Amino acid sequence: MKRIFHAFMFVMKCIIYTPLIILFHVFDKSRGLSREREYWYDTLFPNSKKRGLFIKLLDLKEYRSVLYYRIGGLSRIIKWLLPGQVALFIVCRNIGNGLVIQHGYSTRIGRAISIGEKCQIWHNVTIGTNRSHSGNYPIIGNNVKICAGAIVLGNITIGDNVTIGAGSVVVKDVPSNSVVVGNPARIIKTEPKL
């Protein structure tokens, strides 16, 4: 009985994943999706030998959510058949290549935010505006890691190569090459530029 079930699930995955893989290849050259896929592999499966197995990534709801964000409106039918992470909200318009969302449950990336390339975001993260500064959104640099439960609010700039610790509340600018922790966030380490 288990073999029949696994065979059925394999056939269903092939049926559902095939249009998604076709869409991926159609949009790959214009949007750089293969570079982003490689960054996901490097981040989540650094020792994996099977890099060409795209289905390994398609099994991740967070990856599907980011892929649907990149593809846009054409993914509506596939979203219905194979949804992404339900509690992951990406309404931002300007995200660089290489965004990796790990365990994206209860994560919200608000509109008008600018996120650089090769950023990592963990679960329960909120990036948005501060009510007292309505309309002003954060600008996040390249290679930024935002750990679990962090909140980034207001008209602030997060520099390149910054790590925001778990549970931090960032409401002020953070210089490049820094590590910030706490509520309110404070800089605990700053690396010199290489």
Image: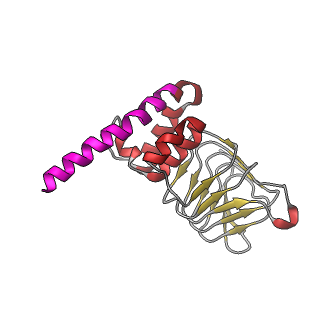
Which of the two residues, 42 or 100, is positioned nearer the viewer here? 100
Is residue 77 covered in magenta? no
Residue 18 x, y percent position in the rendering: 37, 34
Residue 124 x, y percent position in the rendering: 58, 66
Q: Residue furthest bottom?
A: 183
**Dominant SS in magenta:** helix
**Colour scheme in the image?**
secondary structure
Q: Looking at the image, which residue is at 60% across and 68% down?
A: 149
Which of the two residues, 124 or 26, is positioned nearer the viewer here? 26
In the picture, measured across the screen, residue 171 lies left or right of residue 163, that is right
Is 134 above or below relative to 112?
below
Q: Quadrant of the N terminus?
A: bottom left
Q: Quadrant of the C terminus?
A: top right
Is 172 above or below relative to 51?
below
Is 146 above or below relative to 56?
below
Residue 37 x, y percent position in the rendering: 47, 38
Residue 167 x, y percent position in the rendering: 62, 71
Which of the two residues, 83 or 98, is positioned nearer the viewer here? 83
Q: Looking at the image, which residue is at 30% across and 43% down?
A: 12
Which of the two residues, 154 or 63, is positioned nearer the viewer here? 63
Point out the stretch of residues depicted in magenta: 1-26
Q: Looking at the image, which residue is at 31% across and 38% down?
A: 14
Is residue 16 covered in magenta? yes
Disc tally is 0
In the picture, measured across the screen, residue 101 lies left or right of residue 117, that is left
